Amino acid sequence: MDEKEAFRDEFEMHATDAGIAPGYVDEYYGLLFEIATGLVSRGEGLFVLGIAGAQGTGKSTFARLLAIIFERVFERTSLVLSLDDFYLTHAERQQLAARVHPMLAVRGVPGTHDMEMLRSVIRKLKARDNCEVPTFDKAQDDRGAMIPVMGARLDLLVIEGWCWGAMPGSEAELSRPVNELEITEDADGTWRRYVNQQLASTLYQSTFSESEVNFFLAAPGMDAVRRWRWQQEQRLARSSTGRAVMSEEAVNRFVMYYERITARMLKDLPSVSNLTLYLDDDHHFVRAPDRDRR
């Protein structure tokens, strides 16, 4: 029995716990095993992989299951970091909202992350130094505990974040609101221009460049993003986390904060990512749509 076959049953347990449909486990496993094999073949030293994708595309699940294979089958060490854990604190975002625009109180868009901390963590781990990484308590909308990480023997660092690798838009693009939220709450474009300036900054772009390879999980469109994000909220409602959940209307409004950059990523990232994995409406990976083939 080879390594891949030997680990298959254990992988199914992890995949099922993560919500992967039983009939899709083998295909998902085959893809992740192939990727993990390629990562192992890159040799010694810390390798940094970035994974981007809109809300609900399954970045966290993809990263976590990839790390499990990397560790359990190939006996290498890994760490998965989420861009979400590097949000500014609640107090810092309140100050930003008062100083620049009220919409910046809502976490998620460029300008609401502590990118200096993230870049420092990545560089310390590349140097094999120990460091602390933050956690973020979404129920409290604030930073949680700091977790110590040993950098000495880390082989793979996976950073997953919805806007990882995103590029800024043009002034012509920014002049036009893309949804009702921007029409009613950002009529003069102050918020979206600030977000775009932050995304274009050396701090964001240099941090993105710390990853040696980038993957992009491409949703079929914004309708799917809204639906998947609502499904996530419903799963939270059925869980025992005790976290208050949003209504479908609130979810749709929340997704509007990300819509402008998400749409641009769907257009731009397939041409610059090392690997783009297209998702269909059932959340399965498919071949590139005809419109994106050249």
Image: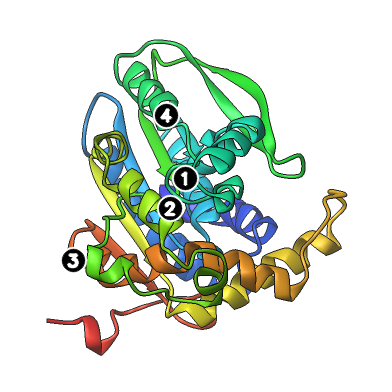
Residue 39 image-quadrant placement: top left
Q: CA gap, disc 4 to disc 1?
A: 25 Å
Q: Could you classify mark 4 by the number of other residues whose Cα lies within 10 Å: few (under 14), some (14-19), or many (20 or more)?
A: many
Q: Which mark is residue 69?
A: 1
Q: What kind of residue is marked 3?
A: Ser
Which sits earlier in the primary sequence, circle 3 or circle 4? 4
Element under disc 3: helix
Q: Could you classify mark 2 by the number of other residues whose Cα lies within 10 Å: few (under 14), some (14-19), or many (20 or more)?
A: some
- Callout in the foreground (1, 2): 1
Q: What kind of residue is marked 4?
A: Leu
In the picture of the structure, the residue carrying the numbered disc 3 is 271
Residue drawn at x 43%, y 53% as measured from the top left: 4
Which sits earlier in the primary sequence, circle 1 or circle 2? 2
Element under disc 4: helix
Q: CA gap, disc 3 to disc 4?
A: 26 Å
Q: Which mark is residue 118?
A: 4
Residue drawn at x 66%, y 55% as measured from the top left: 13
In the picture of the structure, the residue carrying the numbered disc 2 is 4
- Callout in the foreground (3, 1): 3
Q: CA gap, disc 3 to disc 2?
A: 31 Å
Name the foreground residue: 23 vs 103: 103
Q: CA gap, disc 3 to disc 1?
A: 28 Å
Residue at the bottom extreme, as displayed: 290
